[in-house]
Amino acid sequence: MDYGRDPIFPEGFLWGASSAAWQVEGGVAEGGRTPAIIDLNSKTKKPYADNSIAADHYHHWKEDVQLMAECGFTSYRFSLAWPRIIPTSDGKINPEGIQFYNDLIDELLAHNITPIVTLYHYDMPVWVDELGGWRDRRVIELFDHYVRVCFEAFGDRVKYWLSINEQNMQIVYGKWLGLDKGCADWEKDKWRINHIMNLCHAKAVIACHELVEGGKIGPVPGYVPIYPESCKPLDQIAAMNAEELTEKIWNDLYAFREYSGFVKQYWKLHDIDPDIRPGDMELIGQAKIDYFALNCYRSNVAKDCPKEESYLELALNKEGKKGQFVYPKFPGEYALAPNPYVETTDWDWEIDPVAMRYMLRYVWDHYRLPMMITENGLGAHEQVGPDGQVHDANRIAFLRDQIYQVGLAIEDGCEVIGYNPWSFTDLLSTGNGMAKRYGLVYINTTDEETLDLRRIPKDSFYWYSRLIRSNGRDW
Ligand code: BGP
């Protein structure tokens, strides 16, 4: 539909931005925090960048919240670091970790900024990993203990909770993220790991409803809408296969609390045992989510890939030089392909604002649950200009187009309660450290050299501020 006028955002819409503990905090050895698996990855796995300082939010949180308030934020999405809260295997609570987040939450609330809190965003404590991490069912009770501590400590003030960030992407890109450690056959083992993660998600949902008065909790799928390459009927089925195997299997489980016929058939065909034990599905059955938090940056195109074709492994663009991404082929399922209708970023991510509207309509049509955007943004190479400012016109154009499509989806009848792009300040990219910047606020440091970590609001900060102060009218 063309509405013939700019979209209208509902009153009370949550306007903010996003971050994650390991990417923004730094202070990894301070305040009683112990190492997380991601700390080790960031030191050994190139091009991951050392996260021991990151954006140094651990020491700049007050200034950062002040900047959010100046921008006019009404929400801020961030994650809690498990190894800051439960640093050791005796399960003892670290009062300094609780204090850090209490101070942050109180400061946000003092500025009328609603906290939206992710329980898990890739920073599993090393002590949990040594017990087997997501591979071992003992993690279910450990995670349950951790989330209950969080709900009890912060649930009086935090009402919006998120369980596990991008569980689907952690499984789909598990080899790249290091989740395959200790797995003999990742393609089979990943379904067992995924089932354990589903049980952890369920524990968090159940505990939130038990312990947080008025608390709402949802999952955070990483969402990449997939279009068929052509109107050839088999391209449509390929797009549906890709959608299932990267997103829908997860979203169906969260929303309907049972495994779909599609995934059960997939397991049978590939001789996979996800190790579902008595009582598991009853637990999942009790975990009724309140909303979907959605991370969406780009779209993909899928085409038919007959069984006879050869498998081709995906290769991610790790340097920010266009053209390095390798489109994978999964014979008998689908192949990904370039989209001639959209531009791409330097990391070969499709710039496709319409995908935002498509995703919101798709998720609304399938699940009829409120939705919140918890990530969306432009990763770019950036420097401070000779005038001491950062002129990120590309980011303004990106955000404007994306937010406009959120508005159109709202006009289309979708219930969307907030928009929190990635990211508030520059922070470490999972793929490229500080070389790939997303922030509305520049952090003066680089991967090669730690500088003064000065905060410099970019042009996009001022543009976004005007937009949110007008509740989405001043484009
Ligand atoms: C999401 C993650 C974030 C963030 C973002 C951008 O998948 O939830 O943690 O990093 O992607 O990705 P990247 O940093 O690789 O550009």
Image: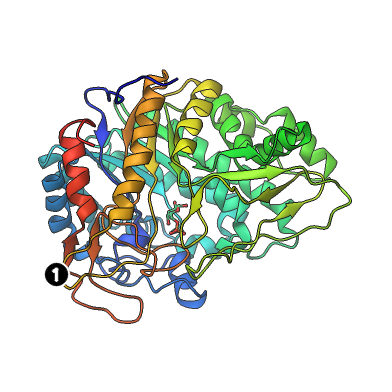
Q: Residue at x 40, y 55 (%)?
A: 91
Q: Taking the image as four quarters, which one is ligand 1 found in?
A: bottom left
Residue under the point 17% across and 69% down: 454
| Placement of 339 over or under 240, stated as above or below | below
Q: Tell me: residue 377, above or below residue 227.
A: below
Left or right, 108 with respect to 402, comes to left
Residue 278 image offset from top left, x and y in percent: 68, 33
* Disc 1 residue type (three-letter): Asp
How is the protein colored in the picture? rainbow
Quadrant in which the N terminus is drawn: top left
Per the image, the residue denoted by label 1 is 387
Label 1, secondary structure: give it: loop
Residue 427 at x, y percent in the picture:
32, 62
- Place residue 394 in its image quadrant: bottom left
- Kindly tell me whether residue 98 is visible in this rendering: yes
Q: In the rendering, at what x and y percent does residue 441 appear? A: 22, 58
